[in-house]
Image: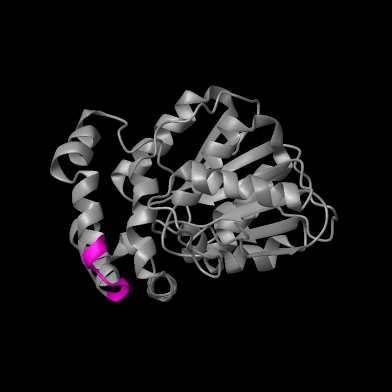
Protein backbone atom coordinates (compact mmCIF):
# COMPACT_ATOMS: atom_id res chain seq x y z
CA UNK A 1 0.00 0.00 0.00
CA UNK A 2 1.58 3.28 -1.16
CA UNK A 3 0.44 5.97 1.23
CA UNK A 4 0.38 9.66 0.39
CA UNK A 5 2.62 11.63 2.73
CA UNK A 6 4.45 14.93 3.21
CA UNK A 7 7.84 15.18 4.85
CA UNK A 8 9.94 18.23 5.64
CA UNK A 9 12.49 19.51 8.11
CA UNK A 10 15.52 18.01 9.85
CA UNK A 11 16.41 16.31 13.09
CA UNK A 12 14.23 14.02 15.19
CA UNK A 13 11.25 12.58 13.30
CA UNK A 14 7.78 13.65 14.46
CA UNK A 15 4.83 11.84 12.82
CA UNK A 16 1.24 13.13 12.75
CA UNK A 17 -1.69 10.72 12.20
CA UNK A 18 -5.19 12.06 11.51
CA UNK A 19 -8.60 10.86 12.69
CA UNK A 20 -11.25 8.79 10.94
CA UNK A 21 -12.70 10.22 7.70
CA UNK A 22 -10.45 13.29 7.72
CA UNK A 23 -6.90 13.46 6.35
CA UNK A 24 -3.45 14.85 7.01
CA UNK A 25 -4.57 18.42 6.29
CA UNK A 26 -6.06 18.51 9.80
CA UNK A 27 -2.40 18.89 10.86
CA UNK A 28 -1.58 21.84 8.57
CA UNK A 29 -0.93 24.19 11.51
CA UNK A 30 1.36 21.63 13.12
CA UNK A 31 3.20 20.81 9.89
CA UNK A 32 3.93 24.49 9.23
CA UNK A 33 5.22 25.00 12.76
CA UNK A 34 7.13 21.85 13.65
CA UNK A 35 9.02 21.51 10.36
CA UNK A 36 11.22 24.36 11.58
CA UNK A 37 12.24 22.29 14.62
CA UNK A 38 11.89 18.62 13.62
CA UNK A 39 11.68 16.30 10.63
CA UNK A 40 7.90 16.19 10.25
CA UNK A 41 5.94 13.45 8.50
CA UNK A 42 2.18 13.68 7.88
CA UNK A 43 0.38 10.70 6.37
CA UNK A 44 -2.99 10.02 4.75
CA UNK A 45 -4.08 6.64 6.10
CA UNK A 46 -5.41 4.01 3.69
CA UNK A 47 -8.74 5.10 2.18
CA UNK A 48 -8.34 8.70 3.38
CA UNK A 49 -7.31 11.85 1.56
CA UNK A 50 -4.97 11.11 -1.32
CA UNK A 51 -4.05 7.58 -0.23
CA UNK A 52 -5.71 4.80 -2.23
CA UNK A 53 -8.36 2.40 -1.01
CA UNK A 54 -7.98 -1.36 -1.32
CA UNK A 55 -9.94 -4.53 -2.00
CA UNK A 56 -10.15 -5.45 1.67
CA UNK A 57 -13.74 -5.78 2.87
CA UNK A 58 -12.88 -4.29 6.28
CA UNK A 59 -10.01 -2.41 7.89
CA UNK A 60 -8.57 -2.71 11.36
CA UNK A 61 -6.27 -0.47 13.36
CA UNK A 62 -3.61 -3.09 12.66
CA UNK A 63 -4.18 -2.53 8.91
CA UNK A 64 -3.35 1.16 9.29
CA UNK A 65 -0.51 0.45 11.72
CA UNK A 66 1.22 -2.02 9.42
CA UNK A 67 0.81 0.38 6.49
CA UNK A 68 2.62 3.00 8.54
CA UNK A 69 5.43 0.63 9.50
CA UNK A 70 6.00 -0.27 5.83
CA UNK A 71 6.21 3.45 5.00
CA UNK A 72 8.68 4.08 7.82
CA UNK A 73 10.82 1.19 6.59
CA UNK A 74 10.76 2.62 3.06
CA UNK A 75 11.80 6.03 4.41
CA UNK A 76 14.45 4.39 6.63
CA UNK A 77 12.97 5.96 9.76
CA UNK A 78 14.08 3.73 12.62
CA UNK A 79 12.58 5.58 15.57
CA UNK A 80 10.18 8.50 15.94
CA UNK A 81 7.76 10.42 18.11
CA UNK A 82 4.16 9.81 17.01
CA UNK A 83 1.23 12.18 17.49
CA UNK A 84 -2.22 10.76 16.71
CA UNK A 85 -5.71 12.28 16.75
CA UNK A 86 -8.73 10.04 17.46
CA UNK A 87 -8.32 7.09 15.03
CA UNK A 88 -4.72 8.27 14.63
CA UNK A 89 -4.27 7.86 18.39
CA UNK A 90 -5.43 4.25 18.04
CA UNK A 91 -2.86 3.65 15.30
CA UNK A 92 -0.18 5.29 17.44
CA UNK A 93 -1.09 3.01 20.36
CA UNK A 94 -0.93 -0.05 18.10
CA UNK A 95 2.54 0.87 16.83
CA UNK A 96 3.82 1.63 20.34
CA UNK A 97 2.46 -1.64 21.74
CA UNK A 98 3.75 -3.82 18.90
CA UNK A 99 6.93 -1.97 17.92
CA UNK A 100 8.08 -0.28 21.15
CA UNK A 101 11.70 -0.05 20.00
CA UNK A 102 10.55 2.17 17.10
CA UNK A 103 8.82 4.74 19.34
CA UNK A 104 10.49 7.61 21.19
CA UNK A 105 7.32 9.28 22.49
CA UNK A 106 3.55 9.29 22.03
CA UNK A 107 1.19 12.25 21.88
CA UNK A 108 -2.43 11.04 21.97
CA UNK A 109 -5.11 13.62 21.13
CA UNK A 110 -8.78 12.82 21.75
CA UNK A 111 -7.68 9.27 22.51
CA UNK A 112 -9.77 6.14 22.96
CA UNK A 113 -8.40 3.19 24.91
CA UNK A 114 -10.93 0.64 23.61
CA UNK A 115 -14.48 0.61 22.26
CA UNK A 116 -15.32 -1.81 25.07
CA UNK A 117 -13.52 -0.32 28.04
CA UNK A 118 -16.41 -0.84 30.47
CA UNK A 119 -19.81 -2.57 30.71
CA UNK A 120 -21.73 0.45 29.37
CA UNK A 121 -19.57 0.62 26.24
CA UNK A 122 -19.86 -3.14 25.72
CA UNK A 123 -23.67 -2.83 25.80
CA UNK A 124 -23.58 0.03 23.28
CA UNK A 125 -21.27 -1.75 20.85
CA UNK A 126 -22.87 -5.20 21.09
CA UNK A 127 -26.59 -4.51 21.67
CA UNK A 128 -27.61 -0.88 21.02
CA UNK A 129 -25.43 -0.24 17.95
CA UNK A 130 -23.65 -3.46 17.02
CA UNK A 131 -21.14 -3.61 14.21
CA UNK A 132 -23.44 -5.38 11.73
CA UNK A 133 -26.04 -2.59 12.05
CA UNK A 134 -23.43 0.10 11.44
CA UNK A 135 -21.97 -1.75 8.46
CA UNK A 136 -25.41 -2.20 6.88
CA UNK A 137 -26.31 1.45 7.46
CA UNK A 138 -23.04 2.80 6.07
CA UNK A 139 -23.28 0.61 2.98
CA UNK A 140 -26.55 2.36 2.08
CA UNK A 141 -25.33 5.94 2.61
CA UNK A 142 -23.37 8.02 0.15
CA UNK A 143 -20.61 10.20 1.52
CA UNK A 144 -22.67 13.40 1.77
CA UNK A 145 -25.51 11.60 3.56
CA UNK A 146 -23.01 9.98 5.91
CA UNK A 147 -21.54 13.38 6.73
CA UNK A 148 -24.96 14.90 7.44
CA UNK A 149 -26.03 11.99 9.64
CA UNK A 150 -22.73 12.00 11.54
CA UNK A 151 -22.77 15.75 12.16
CA UNK A 152 -26.40 15.63 13.29
CA UNK A 153 -25.73 12.81 15.76
CA UNK A 154 -22.70 14.58 17.20
CA UNK A 155 -24.57 17.87 17.42
CA UNK A 156 -27.57 16.18 19.10
CA UNK A 157 -25.45 14.26 21.62
CA UNK A 158 -22.65 16.71 22.37
CA UNK A 159 -23.41 20.04 20.70
CA UNK A 160 -21.42 22.15 18.27
CA UNK A 161 -18.68 22.77 20.83
CA UNK A 162 -17.63 19.11 20.55
CA UNK A 163 -17.30 19.56 16.80
CA UNK A 164 -15.00 22.54 17.36
CA UNK A 165 -14.89 26.00 15.85
CA UNK A 166 -16.70 26.82 12.62
CA UNK A 167 -13.34 26.70 10.82
CA UNK A 168 -12.62 23.23 12.20
CA UNK A 169 -16.09 21.96 11.31
CA UNK A 170 -15.66 23.19 7.74
CA UNK A 171 -12.24 21.53 7.50
CA UNK A 172 -13.76 18.23 8.66
CA UNK A 173 -16.67 18.51 6.19
CA UNK A 174 -14.33 19.08 3.25
CA UNK A 175 -12.22 16.11 4.30
CA UNK A 176 -15.15 13.71 4.69
CA UNK A 177 -16.44 14.56 1.21
CA UNK A 178 -13.18 13.20 -0.22
CA UNK A 179 -13.75 9.72 1.27
CA UNK A 180 -15.12 7.24 -1.24
CA UNK A 181 -18.46 5.67 -0.35
CA UNK A 182 -16.95 2.18 -0.33
CA UNK A 183 -14.51 3.19 2.42
CA UNK A 184 -17.08 4.43 4.97
CA UNK A 185 -17.90 1.08 6.54
CA UNK A 186 -14.32 -0.20 6.24
CA UNK A 187 -12.98 2.70 8.30
CA UNK A 188 -15.77 2.37 10.86
CA UNK A 189 -14.90 -1.31 11.21
CA UNK A 190 -11.40 -0.35 12.34
CA UNK A 191 -12.71 2.05 14.97
CA UNK A 192 -15.38 -0.37 16.21
CA UNK A 193 -12.97 -3.28 16.61
CA UNK A 194 -10.24 -1.38 18.47
CA UNK A 195 -9.24 -2.90 21.80
CA UNK A 196 -6.78 -2.02 24.56
CA UNK A 197 -3.11 -1.98 23.65
CA UNK A 198 -0.22 -2.75 25.95
CA UNK A 199 1.32 0.68 26.41
CA UNK A 200 3.63 -0.72 29.07
CA UNK A 201 5.53 -2.56 26.35
CA UNK A 202 8.22 0.13 26.34
CA UNK A 203 9.58 3.10 28.26
CA UNK A 204 8.36 5.83 25.89
CA UNK A 205 6.71 8.87 27.56
CA UNK A 206 3.07 9.59 26.72
CA UNK A 207 1.28 12.93 26.53
CA UNK A 208 -2.53 12.98 26.33
CA UNK A 209 -4.36 16.13 25.26
CA UNK A 210 -8.10 16.71 25.26
CA UNK A 211 -10.16 19.69 24.21
CA UNK A 212 -12.33 20.83 27.12
CA UNK A 213 -15.46 20.35 24.99
CA UNK A 214 -14.55 16.83 23.93
CA UNK A 215 -16.84 13.94 24.86
CA UNK A 216 -16.84 12.94 28.55
CA UNK A 217 -16.14 9.40 27.32
CA UNK A 218 -12.95 10.56 25.61
CA UNK A 219 -11.87 12.43 28.73
CA UNK A 220 -12.44 9.28 30.79
CA UNK A 221 -10.42 7.18 28.36
CA UNK A 222 -7.55 9.66 28.47
CA UNK A 223 -7.54 9.57 32.26
CA UNK A 224 -7.57 5.77 32.12
CA UNK A 225 -4.56 5.66 29.79
CA UNK A 226 -2.67 8.22 31.89
CA UNK A 227 -3.25 6.19 35.05
CA UNK A 228 -2.36 2.89 33.35
CA UNK A 229 1.13 4.08 32.38
CA UNK A 230 1.82 5.69 35.76
CA UNK A 231 4.61 8.30 35.83
CA UNK A 232 5.19 8.00 32.07
CA UNK A 233 1.85 9.68 31.37
CA UNK A 234 0.95 13.39 31.35
CA UNK A 235 -2.56 14.69 30.69
CA UNK A 236 -3.51 18.22 29.56
CA UNK A 237 -6.91 19.77 28.96
CA UNK A 238 -7.08 22.56 26.39
CA UNK A 239 -9.80 25.13 27.08
CA UNK A 240 -11.84 26.61 24.24
CA UNK A 241 -11.36 23.53 22.06
CA UNK A 242 -13.27 20.46 20.89
CA UNK A 243 -12.20 17.01 19.72
CA UNK A 244 -9.73 18.32 17.11
CA UNK A 245 -8.16 20.67 19.64
CA UNK A 246 -4.97 20.90 17.57
CA UNK A 247 -6.98 22.74 14.90
CA UNK A 248 -9.14 24.78 17.29
CA UNK A 249 -6.21 26.14 19.34
CA UNK A 250 -3.07 25.48 17.26
CA UNK A 251 -0.75 28.03 18.88
CA UNK A 252 -1.25 26.65 22.37
CA UNK A 253 -1.30 23.05 21.20
CA UNK A 254 2.01 23.49 19.37
CA UNK A 255 3.68 25.15 22.33
CA UNK A 256 2.52 22.49 24.76
CA UNK A 257 3.74 19.65 22.56
CA UNK A 258 7.11 21.29 21.87
CA UNK A 259 7.76 21.98 25.57
CA UNK A 260 6.79 18.43 26.49
CA UNK A 261 9.01 16.93 23.77
CA UNK A 262 11.95 18.97 24.99
CA UNK A 263 11.31 17.93 28.59
CA UNK A 264 11.46 14.33 27.44
CA UNK A 265 14.70 14.80 25.48
CA UNK A 266 13.08 14.82 22.02
CA UNK A 267 15.06 17.90 21.15
CA UNK A 268 14.65 20.25 18.16
CA UNK A 269 17.54 20.40 15.72
CA UNK A 270 17.98 24.14 16.21
CA UNK A 271 17.52 26.73 18.92
CA UNK A 272 16.17 29.59 16.82
CA UNK A 273 12.98 29.58 18.86
CA UNK A 274 13.05 29.14 22.63
CA UNK A 275 9.74 29.01 24.45
CA UNK A 276 9.28 30.92 27.69
CA UNK A 277 7.13 28.52 29.73
CA UNK A 278 6.04 31.27 32.13
CA UNK A 279 4.01 32.88 29.33
CA UNK A 280 1.94 29.81 28.52
CA UNK A 281 -0.73 30.46 31.17
CA UNK A 282 -1.19 34.05 29.92
CA UNK A 283 -2.77 32.95 26.64
CA UNK A 284 -6.52 33.54 26.23
CA UNK A 285 -8.98 30.63 26.51
CA UNK A 286 -6.36 28.28 27.88
CA UNK A 287 -5.96 26.50 31.19
CA UNK A 288 -2.44 25.16 31.36
CA UNK A 289 -2.00 21.64 32.70
CA UNK A 290 0.72 21.00 35.25
CA UNK A 291 3.99 20.44 33.44
CA UNK A 292 5.60 17.36 34.96
Q: How many discs appear?
A: 0
Looking at the picture, tell me which residue is in the foreground, 265 or 200. 200
| Residue 188 visible from this viewpoint | yes
Q: Is residue 142 magenta?
A: yes
* Quarter assignment of residue 17: bottom right
Q: Residue at x 18, y 61 (%)?
A: 156
Residue 24 location (% of width, % of height)? 56, 64
Q: Name the dominant secondary structure of the magenta segment.
A: helix
Residue 193 location (% of width, % of height)? 35, 40
* Quarter assignment of residue 34: bottom right
Looking at the picture, tell me which residue is in the foreground, 150 or 179. 179
| Residue 278 visible from this viewpoint | no
Q: Residue at x 74, y 62 (%)?
A: 35
Tell whether 225 sits left or right of 189. Answer: right
The image's colouring method is one colour
Tell whether 161 sits left or right of 167. Answer: left
Q: Residue furthest front?
A: 55
Q: Residue at x 77, y 41 (%)?
A: 78
Residue 19 location (% of width, % of height)? 46, 56
Is 226 located above or below residue 54 in the figure?
above
For the N terminus, the quadrant is bottom right
Looking at the picture, tell me which residue is in the foreground, 190 or 224. 190
Magenta segment range? 139-144
Residue 85 location (% of width, % of height)? 49, 52
Is 64 located above or below residue 79 in the figure?
below
Tell whether 292 sits left or right of 172. Answer: right
For the C terminus, the quadrant is top right
Is 56 located above or below residue 200 in the figure?
below
Q: Is residue 120 magenta?
A: no
Amino acid sequence: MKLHYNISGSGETLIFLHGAYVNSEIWNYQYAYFKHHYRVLTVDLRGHGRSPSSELSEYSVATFGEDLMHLLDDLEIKKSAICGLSLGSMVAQYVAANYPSRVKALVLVGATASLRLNLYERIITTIVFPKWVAMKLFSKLNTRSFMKVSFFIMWFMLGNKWLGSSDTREKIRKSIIQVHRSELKKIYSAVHSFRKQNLNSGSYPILLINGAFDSPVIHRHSRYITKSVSTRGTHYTLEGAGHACNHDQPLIFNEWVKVWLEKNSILPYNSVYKLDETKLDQRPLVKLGQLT
